[in-house]
Image (cartoon, rainbow, N blue to C red):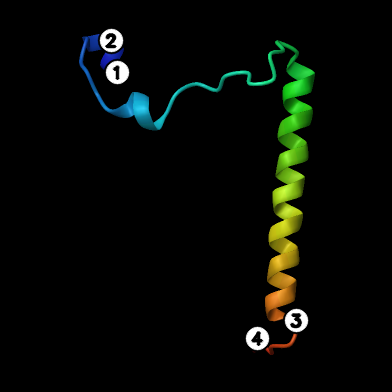
Amino acid sequence: MSSAFGLQTGLEWIWSPPVHTLNSSNAYLGILTSVTMLIGVSLSMIGIGSAVFSKKEIM
């Protein structure tokens, strides 16, 4: 919206389109990296949650 009307906003500091940081334009490498990071973060969160609540009764 800001570029359509020529306005200056602070959105450029918060959000910008994704860029390739592996110096590759290979889409499959980007997908593989994203899926690997998603699975890694998800498994670590599940592991932390399991460790915290393993000895506690929730209900």
Q: Nearer the viewer, mark 3 or mark 4?
A: 3
Q: Amino acid at mark 3?
A: Ser
Q: Secondary structure at mark 3?
A: loop
> Which mark is first along the chain, 1 or 3?
1
Asked if residue 25 is positioned above or below residue 22 in the image, the reply reads: above
Q: CA distance from mark 2 to mark 1?
A: 5 Å
Label 2 crowd bin: few (<14), some (14–19), many (20+), radius 10 Å? few
Percent position of residue 43, x then y: 76, 56
Q: For residue 27, what is the image quadrant?
A: top right
Q: Which residue is mark 4?
A: 58
Residue pictured at 35% horizontal, 24% vertical = 12
The N terminus lies in which quarter of the figure? top left
Q: Secondary structure at mark 4?
A: loop
Q: Which residue is mark 2?
A: 4
Q: For residue 21, what is the image quadrant?
A: top right
Q: Is the C-beta separation of discs 4 and 2 under 8 Å?
A: no
Asked if residue 42 is positioned above or below residue 2 in the image, the reply reads: below
Marker disc for residue 40: none
Q: Is the C-beta separation of discs 3 and 1 under 8 Å?
A: no
Residue pictured at 71% horizontal, 43% vertical = 38
Asked if residue 27 is positioned above or below residue 13 in the image, the reply reads: above
Q: Which residue is mark 1?
A: 1
Q: Which residue is mark 3?
A: 54
Q: CA distance from mark 4 to mark 2?
A: 52 Å
Residue pictured at 73% horizontal, 63% vertical = 46
Q: CA distance from mark 3 to mark 1?
A: 48 Å
Label 3 crowd bin: few (<14), some (14–19), many (20+), radius 10 Å? few
- In the visual, does 18 lie left or right of 23? left
Q: Amino acid at mark 1?
A: Met
